[in-house]
Amino acid sequence: MQITVLRETQANEARVALVPESVRKLVALKAAVAVESGAGLLAGATDDAYREASADVHVDRESLLASADVLAAVNRPAAEDIGRLKEGAVVLGFLRPLDEPAALEPVVTQKLTAFAMELIPRITRAQAMDALSSMATVVGYKSVLMAADQIPRMFPMLMTAAGTVPPARVLVLGAGVAGLQAIATARRLGAVVEAYDVRKAAGEQVRSLGAQFLEVDLGGIQTEDAGGYAVELSEEALKRGRDLIAERAKSADVIITTAQVPGRRAPLLVTEEAVQGMKRGAVVVDLAGATGGNCAAARPGETVEREGVLIMSPLNLAATVPVHASQLYSRNVTAFLSLLIKEGALNIDMADDVVGPACVTHRREYVHPRVAAALEELAGR
Ligand code: NAD
């Protein structure tokens, strides 16, 4: 059974799906691993490091695809690459099945078995496979460094012979995985941090990191679902949050926004008026750009300026920390693959409570309902 790793082709992508450390683990499970030459270079993994880990390194991408039983990827592979895989092969990666279901048509027609890393359930048993959390951790960290690099002041409070320098003030909106990592990073740099989230449970986590939790009276409405995710709020509840944020934004040097609601547009939390009320030189880093953004002024993938306030909306920030992002992702992928491998062969148990829910399509016998609906719509046009 051959697991193949290719060089990622998406623009600005520097991550690799499997690093040599994981190759060793997979080889110990009696799988063979084949890697395209140069696949890991931007993530610090040379061809020699892969060879030392017992992978085969090849330059011929087409033959690597044709011989693959499993294609492990970071991003959804291009349709051209998908078309070269053999029927029944497995492909896994961030496939974006809910955002771009129609793009998975080649995977379905090719009768592949596809697993989306973003569909892996966040249950205790699957914690080691939680690639969303891994990437959110990297993104939360990096967003604070980007902001620190842009603001015209320092983060820590300094007491010098020339007097005292006050600490930077950071406001974090959304205290999930990325938000908590942003809080921790800003605190390590010495900033004074405030955070806001609609989930009550976030309060304790925010405070345990030495930040202040901002609470809004939402009149006791339900703010989270049974899975612990935030739900879409009413306009009135959102407005109460926005008013508090606009008030706190006035003294912030940095705002990091991370708020998301699964399957919905990201909530608008920082209005144009709130940006206008910010200090010159302040920076907003909007991490929800891919789902519409939390800041009204943000443009996904761009940096814009409003009277001296910079609003950054970086996309694919995890790829800017490729060594550790790849290491974490590779461990997540390896933990998932180890569920699919028995005695060196593929053994897909769709009844498994992690494998089944992560599946987008299985040899056309199963197609995820959202993907099936998108394909029907395409056929009807
Ligand atoms: P996410 O990326 O979906 O959202 C980020 C944050 O935005 C969340 O904390 C959410 O509550 C917040 N948010 C949404 N709407 C908001 C609004 N209008 N105003 C302010 N904040 C808003 O979240 P995530 O980081 O993926 O984590 C979501 C939940 O899942 C958390 O409870 C987290 O602890 C939990 N989680 C569990 C596991 C596990 O058990 N394996 C792993 C990861 C995360």
Image: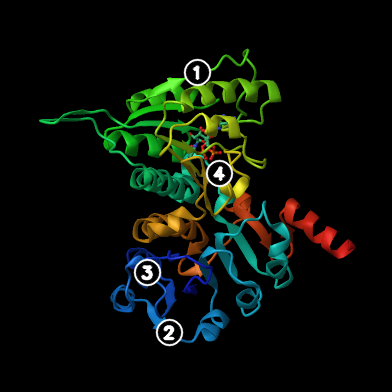
Residue at 37% x, 28% y is 193
Amino acid carrying mark 2 in the image = His
Question: Which residue position is annotated with label 2?
Answer: 58
Label 4: which secondary element? loop
Task: Please tell me whether mark 2 or mark 4 is closer to you in this view.
Answer: 4
Amino acid carrying mark 1 in the image = Glu
Mark 1 is surrounded, within 10 Å at the Cα level, by few (under 14), some (14 to 19) or many (20 or more) other residues, namely: some
Task: Please tell me whether mark 2 or mark 1 is closer to you in this view.
Answer: 1
First-in-chain label (2 vs 1)? 2
Residue 111 at x, y percent in the picture = 70, 70
Report the Cα–Cα distance between label 4 and label 1. 21 Å
Amino acid carrying mark 3 in the image = Leu
First-in-chain label (4 vs 1)? 1
Q: Residue furthest right?
A: 380
First-in-chain label (3 vs 1)? 3
Residue 215: image tag: 1
Report the Cα–Cα distance between label 3 and label 1. 42 Å
Label 3: which secondary element? helix
Report the Cα–Cα distance between label 3 and label 4. 25 Å
Residue 114: image tag: none
Mark 2 is surrounded, within 10 Å at the Cα level, by few (under 14), some (14 to 19) or many (20 or more) other residues, namely: some
Mark 4 is surrounded, within 10 Å at the Cα level, by few (under 14), some (14 to 19) or many (20 or more) other residues, namely: many
Q: How is the image coloured?
A: rainbow
Report the Cα–Cα distance between label 2 and label 3. 17 Å
First-in-chain label (2 vs 3)? 3
- Residues 159 and 56: in front is 159
Residue 337 in the image: above or below residue 3: above
Residue 271 visible at all: no
Task: Please tell me whether mark 2 or mark 3 is closer to you in this view.
Answer: 3
Q: Is residue 160 left or right of residue 155?
A: left
Question: Which residue position is annotated with label 3?
Answer: 42
Question: Which residue position is annotated with label 4?
Answer: 288
